[in-house]
Amino acid sequence: MTAKQTCPHLAAVRTVRGPARRECEECVKIGASWVHLRTCQTCGVTLCCDSSPNRHASKHAHASGHPVIASAEPGERWLYCYPDDAITSY
Ligand SMILES: [Zn+2]
Ligand SMILES: [Zn+2]
Ligand SMILES: [Zn+2]
């Protein structure tokens, strides 16, 4: 399966939101650790990636319906849309 280049959700992102703090809000609450961080482009929450044990960013996207995350890793400049499985760099 090939990821599409663009989708309406990615196209709607005008200003990319970065992490307020470089930590997963949910992991901090439960004392867990994470691998990489992602920032929700709808509400701005920063959560952990699918390589992390708790996969909070994916859980948040599915529970809230917020479609787009950005990488919160230094030097990474990309956005990902969950419903369309689409990725774009900026
Ligand atoms: Zn989309
Ligand atoms: Zn987490
Ligand atoms: Zn959100």
Image (cartoon, rainbow, N blue to C red):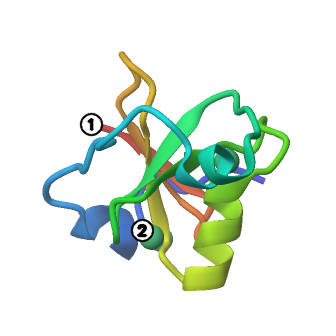
Q: Which amino acid is tagged 1?
A: Tyr
Q: Residue at x 50, y 36 (%)?
A: 23
| Residue situated in front as seen by the camera: 7 or 24 | 24
- Could you give the CA–CA distance between mark 1 and mark 2, rounded to whole angstroms? 14 Å
Q: What residue occupies the far right of the structure in this picture?
A: 53
The label shown at residue 90 is: 1
Residue 32 at x, y percent in the picture: 76, 39
Under 8 Å from ligand 1: the CB of mark 2? yes
Mark 1 vs mark 2: in front? 1
| Residue situated in front as seen by the camera: 25 or 7 | 25
Residue 13 at x, y percent in the picture: 24, 62
The part of the image, by quadrant, that contains residue 89 is top left
Residue 52 at x, y percent in the picture: 77, 37
The part of the image, by quadrant, that contains residue 88 is top left
Query: Can the viewer see residue 83 in this picture?
Result: no
Q: Is residue 80 left or right of residue 8?
A: right
Q: Which amino acid is tagged 2?
A: Cys
| Mark closest to the chain's N terminus, 1 or 2 | 2
Q: Residue at x 40, y 37 (%)?
A: 78
Residue beneath disc 2: 7
Mark 1 neighbour class, 10 Å CA radius: few under 14, some 14 to 19, many 20 or more: few
Picture quadrant of ligand 3? bottom left
Residue 28 at x, y percent in the picture: 61, 44
The label shown at residue 4 is: none
Element type at mark 1? loop
Mark 2 neighbour class, 10 Å CA radius: few under 14, some 14 to 19, many 20 or more: some
